[in-house]
Amino acid sequence: METESIISLVSIITAGFTIAIGSIAPALGEGKALAQALMAIAQQPDETPAITRTLFVGLAMVESTAIYCFVVALILIFANPFWNYMIGG
Amino acid sequence: MEFNIDDIIYWEWEFLKVNATLVFSWFTMTLLIGLGWLISRNLTSGRNISRGQALYESLVVFIVTQIEEATQQKADRYFPFISTLFLFITFSNIIGVIPGVHSPTASLTTTAALAFSVFVAIPVFGVSSIGFKEYFSQYVKPTPVMLPFNIIGELSRTLALAIRLFGNIMSGSLIVAVLLSLSPLFFPVVMQAFGLVIGVIQAYVFSILALVYIASATRIQPGQESDTEIESLTSNRE
């Protein structure tokens, strides 16, 4: 197999695995955080604004792990450094 | 479909290039300045305030309350920086729904610049409020062994700020572009509406994180320095 095909094959498969594996843990974590926040709101409805604010910030921080995986997957597909290196010579 | 909007070049002269990121961040700045000038040229006090002034006042009150709740300090010092960040990022994110306009925050250069300004603002606010010696001694607490880790933590959270905003906004526009080629009629609209929500939430998260970092630098922390942002956010509130 030519080098270009190997690079594209490996990149595409790795990109799929990156986003697949990388989104499992944040999804579990976000679900857990959301469940806890709902429970806290149910117990103390007065504290809803504070809980919601902290929840949003926390969710965004948990989600950033998934976003990193997404960015890496996109780099592998659209802006692969090895690919450009091979094409450039 | 463009992965990197820095590559869209509108005007070029020798080594000077004006790309989409620059054009649309200038567009955002003009929009913000124009709107500000439009409303603030006839401000009144009393009961008969215009609609625009009521909108602006509620926005200012919202930002001030958020700052005061998150830091438990007076909002005056932080207000200019934090509200500028918030308004600029919000507008940059939501102008992406206008056809033909790209969000400047969908480029890593813009978000890196914003994160770098936060990176510079943290020691500036810290030194100006607790003093040079006190601020930099935070780095060697609890032991000097922790010095490299504190520095790495400082750098990595700046990087995380930049990548988080970039990834969220860029993924939003990219998903819309992909969906547009698959099912052009309905789903891109739904995803764009979702992108509006994400844009505002990310602007909020960016500015509140910047605020938490700055506020934690301006406080003398007893004992162990807590590196978790959520922890310090919740403990600030109490």
Image: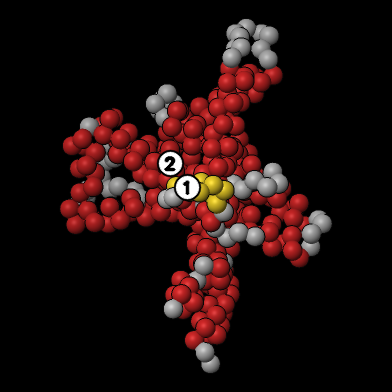
Q: Nearer the viewer, residue B140 or B151?
A: B151
Crowd band around label 2 with a 10 angstrom C-alpha radius: few (<14), some (14–19), many (20+): many
Mark number, residue B210: 2
Residue type highlighted by circle 1: Trp
Residue B180 location, quadrant = bottom right
Q: Residue at x 55, y 27 (%)?
A: B33
Q: Residue at x 54, y 47 (%)?
A: B11
B110 left or right of B145 in image: right
Q: Check the image and name the residue furthest to the front.
A: B14
The spot of residue A25 in percent (x, y) is: 53, 66
Q: Secondary structure beneath disc 1? A: strand
Q: Check the image and name the residue furthest to the bottom.
A: A1
Write down the chain letter for disc 1: B
Residue linked to disc 1: B13
Q: Residue at x 44, y 47 (%)?
A: B16
The spot of residue A30 in percent (x, y) is: 57, 58
B218 left or right of B162 in image: left
Q: Nearer the viewer, residue B43 or A66?
A: B43
Q: Nearer the viewer, residue A63 or B142?
A: A63
Q: Secondary structure beneath disc 2? A: helix
The spot of residue B163 in percent (x, y) is: 47, 55
Residue type highlighted by circle 2: Ala
Image quadrant in which the C terminus of chain B is located: top left
Q: How is the image coloured?
A: secondary structure
* Dot in front, 1 or 2: 1
Crowd band around label 1 with a 10 angstrom C-alpha radius: few (<14), some (14–19), many (20+): few
Whole-number angstrom distance, CA of label 1 to CA of label 2? 37 Å
B207 left or right of A45 in image: left
Write down the chain letter for disc 2: B
Q: Is residue B211 above or below residue B61?
A: below
Mark earlier in primary sequence (1, 2) = 1
